[in-house]
Structures are given as structure tokens and as C-alpha cells.
Image (cartoon, rainbow, N blue to C red):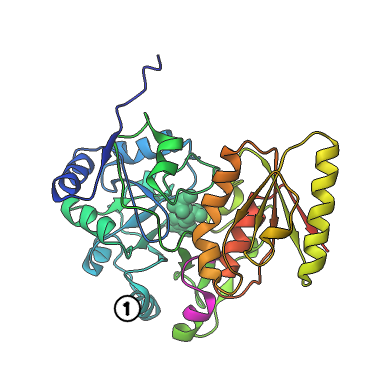
Amino acid sequence: MDLMQKKTEMLSVTDEDLERAAQLIREGGLVAFPTETVYGLGASAMDPAAVSGIFTAKGRPGDNPLIVHIADVSQVYGLSEDITVPAQRLMEAFWPGPLTVVLPRKPGVPDVVTAGLDTVAVRMPDHPVALEVIRRAGVPVAAPSANSSGRPSPTSAAHVAEDLAGKIDAVVDGGPCRVGVESTVVDLTTEPPVILRPGGVTREELEGVLGHMETAASFTYGPVEAPRSPGMKYRHYSPKAEVVLVTGGQPERVTEKINELISRYHCRGKQTGVLAAAETAGRYRADAVFNLGSRGCPEEIARNLFNGLRSLDMQGVDIIISEGYAETGIGTAVMNRLRKAAGSIIEV
Ligand code: AMP
Ligand code: MG
């Protein structure tokens, strides 16, 4: 038996269970809870030993900093004393919500949270369970996604259990996540601000408040030598199966190419799964097809994306082939995650 195994408590959203979750966090434990984006793995941000436990449980590289979650805007002043007018405007417009702001950090924020950077990433989630757990814990809560590092992010308590059962103290089951992709990360320590990671708040929404924003080089794809957001240099969101992304402006050609790939993999004795939009899901001759929802509702595609990757994995396929999506609105975040998950990208 693995001596490191913990008993992971499965908690519900009753008053008693939320109090238990908060107590575990206050006492230095690790608790996964739902947010509107994905499930987070929380520990007291002010307790370096607890925060180290997050890195161990996830197998997360120590140079990849964590987002600190708060339940009330006033808590941001405990983490940064340098909150500019643009930062205030974004916080007012999008909090609580899927926006993380990178701010100069106060010296009191532990190094292990920020991976030694002089900045700290902060977010107020828009989920009653997350807000209640953080509020009751009475401390800011450092919380990356509650998955094993490199795997698709978890959008249900079952996904968290798949990766972390036996490694963390508790999981609060609050049902599936509404947004389904992680928060947008914006660096406000520069002028103009830079979008480091596309996510639940769209570029269009951000620019509606602050005007033009820059985009980090690694935003789309490719190895990054000196990333401003350390998370951008790691392989990410990867199921066990190899992922192939097929993109192109003409849906018929994408469908044709995917069916051609399926035949080729079948010849080699490989099982295939396709991640498809509702409009084209019926056209594939794969061993498994996961319908992500209508192209007319990109929010639905985003919500189902990580579940789709994990479900096809559970069905044991060797290769997952995904269609591409238009890179506007939340489609930008969907394509960012698919590109990072993909071992190869084919443009037709
Ligand atoms: P996760 O919590 O797993 O969704 O990942 C959090 C993301 O925020 C990662 O890409 C981190 O590298 C990024 N991040 C966290 N803190 C900072 C920071 N201080 N500066 C830049 N990026 C950050
Ligand atoms: Mg993550």
C-alpha cells in the first residue's frame, strides 16, 4: 500500500460540509471545490507548507505560480498594494467572474504561491460554493485546477477523483462547471495590459472596458523560451490518447480529412475517437464520437471540452481527433486548449 495515501472526504454543499471544507483549509489541508470555470484545488495561500502540498498532489512544476482566490474585493489589498485604475476597472467589470489579474505582490505573499515572482495572480470566482468556502476559511485560497499536472482540467467532482483521490483531503461536489475553461489571465503590471491566457472572459469583453490589449506570444501555440506566465511553457490538457487537431475554414474538408485519418489509423489497428460539433458529429466512422454541442453556441463547446477529452480517454481510444473552432469570443480559449493538448495540428 502507498503510505502517502490519504482518505479523501467526498463532501456535498450542505452547510455542515462547506464548514468542514473551510475547516480543512484553515488547518492546512487540501480541498477541491467547484468554481464557474473548472474545479480548483485549494489551500490557505498564507500557509507555505499547505501550498507546497498542492504542488506535490498535482505533480506541478514548482516554477508554475498559483492563482489566489478571494471571496471579497477588499481581500485584494492584502495581496497587493499597487492597484492601478485599469486594474480596478477590470475588477469592477468582471468580478466575481472568470478573470485573473496579475498585480505587483506584497512581500507577505509566500514565495511558493508566486514561484518567487514579484507579482501575484488574483481572482474572485463566480460560484456560490467557492465563495462560501473561501469566506468561511477566512483566508485567501491558492487554487490551481484540481487535476494531475498536464491532464485535462476537471469540470466535475468525478474528474477530480479520477486524478487526485487518495492525494487530497476532500472534494466538494457542486455539480458540473458552467464555463468549462479556465479564467482569462491579464497582466496589469505593464502598459498596455497583456492577455497572458485566453479564458472565460473574452478579448472583446476586456477591450470593451480598457481598449486595446496586447497578447502574449505563446497565446496561440509553440514552445516559449521566456514565458511571462510560466504555465505557458508546459504541455497541458493532455488525455492519455494522442490528440490530433484538424482545422480549416471549410467544414466539409475538415470532415473529409478526419474520416481519412480514421481509416488510416484503423488500418494500423488503432482505435479512434472524434470530438465533434453537433452539426458534424453524425458524419464520422470512428470507434467513439463525443458531441461537444452546437457551433452556434461556442459556450456549450467550451463547457463540454474537457469532459469530452476525458470521456474519450475512458473509452480507451488510442487517438482523439478534434475539429477546430472559430477563434472569436470564447472560441479563442477553446482553440488555445486544443492546440496545447494536440501532438499534431493539420490544416486543410
Ligand atoms: P491554473 O491555476 O492551473 O489554471 O494555472 C494558472 C495560470 O496562471 C498558469 O498559467 C500560471 O503560470 C499563471 N500565473 C499564476 N501566477 C502568475 C503570475 N504571478 N504571473 C504570471 N502568470 C501567472
Ligand atoms: Mg491548470
Tell me residue 98's x, y (percent). 41, 66
Look at the picture and state if 73 lies above or below 245.
Answer: below
The residue at 19%/57% (across/down) is 135
Where 188 sits versus 46, above or below? below
Asked if residue 197 shows in the view, the reply is no
Image location of residue 154, percent across then percent down: 45, 48
Residue 348 picture quarter: bottom right
12 left or right, relative to 94: left
Instruction: Name the spot of residue 91 as percent of width and height, x first.
Output: 34, 74
Left or right? Give the position of 343 relative to 43.
Answer: right
Q: Nearer the viewer, residue 172 or 287?
A: 287
- Residue 111: x, y in percent? 37, 46
Identify the magenta region: 196-206
> Could one spot residue 336 in this view of the protein?
yes
- Quadrant of res 68: bottom left
**Rendered image quadrant of residue 164:** top left
Which residue lies under the disc numbered 1? 92
346, above or below 279, in the image? above
Amino acid residing under circle 1: Glu
Give the number of callouts: 1
Check residue 204 for magenta coloring.
Answer: yes
Between 101 and 256, the residue placed more toward the observer is 256
Which SS class for mark 1?
A: helix
